[in-house]
Amino acid sequence: MLAFLKRHPVAIQAFFDFSAVLTYAFPSSILQPLLAPGLKLDERDGHGFLAIAMVHTKRLRPFFVPEFLGNEFFLIGYRIFARFETSTGKRLRGLRILQSETDRAKMVFFGNILTHYNYHKANIKWEKSPESIHVSKDGAEKLDVIFHREPNPPLPPGSLFKDWREARMYAGPLPFTFDYEKETHSIVVIEGVRENWDPLPARIQVNECDFLKREPFASATPRLCSAFVLENVPYMWKRGRRETLAEGR
């Protein structure tokens, strides 16, 4: 029964006040072992990509619940860009979530019942202005980043991308999220439906990011590749659908 609940059995609607995402490149050998069976790394030039998404979400609720009963919370998600081929040969591009943090205990409780997204409660602070978005997190693993809104900002030094158009392919959120159900050796595919998707490049200032100090990330030098900000995005996650993996996948 618990496995069934974690398959995202109900469509969810929400509104993103903003989503600020920074993307790091790591050698493929670092990230591939973190993926579930059946998933392949979405790689480029021998590297895969880890995104850290910071999202202020409003009116989150099951699709049949009135908007005014929705929940407001802040989310920090750590995700790997991945690819999955379905049993019918369709190739999907999406995200595999490693860990999620939120400022609401309610979201931790229900998030860990209905997903495998590994929710934790965190002391998150954020400020949004016309000039910047500042997100910080206290505790054992600290985070402190500032997204500066500027016209035509430069790509971070050492970025793998040649321009912002190329970088936008890894701006997120992607159309699919991939979950793994160990009990049935299956991938649960959750499709997102978005509106007003217009990620704008930002100049990123990373003061602290302790998540990258844990293994296996600490064994490599992360390459900060891009930072984007999305605002005012209506979003919906469809019900998850299960794809049973063949033996050996």
Image: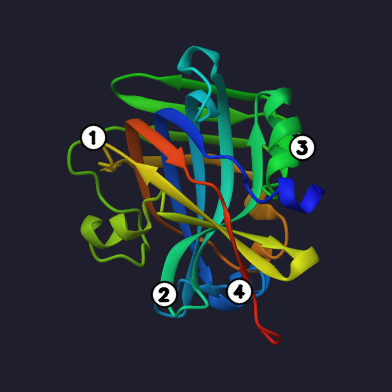
Vertical relation: 231 (above or below) 227: above
Residue at the spot of label 3: 140
Residue 31 image point, x, y percent: 60, 69
Quick check: marks 4 and 2 in contact, CB under 8 Å? no
Disc 4 or 2, which lies upstream in sequence?
A: 4
For residue 90, which numbered disc appears in the image? 2
Residue at the spot of label 1: 150
Residue at the spot of label 4: 32
Q: Amino acid at mark 1?
A: Glu
Q: CA distance from mark 3 to mark 2?
A: 41 Å
Foreground pick, 194 / 208: 194
Q: CA distance from mark 4 to mark 1?
A: 34 Å
Q: Quadrant of residue 152?
A: top left
Q: Is residue 237 left or right of residue 37?
A: left
User: Can I make out residue 121 in this image?
Assistant: no
Q: CA distance from mark 3 to mark 4?
A: 26 Å
Vertical relation: 34 (above or below) 67: below
Q: CA distance from mark 2 to mark 1?
A: 39 Å
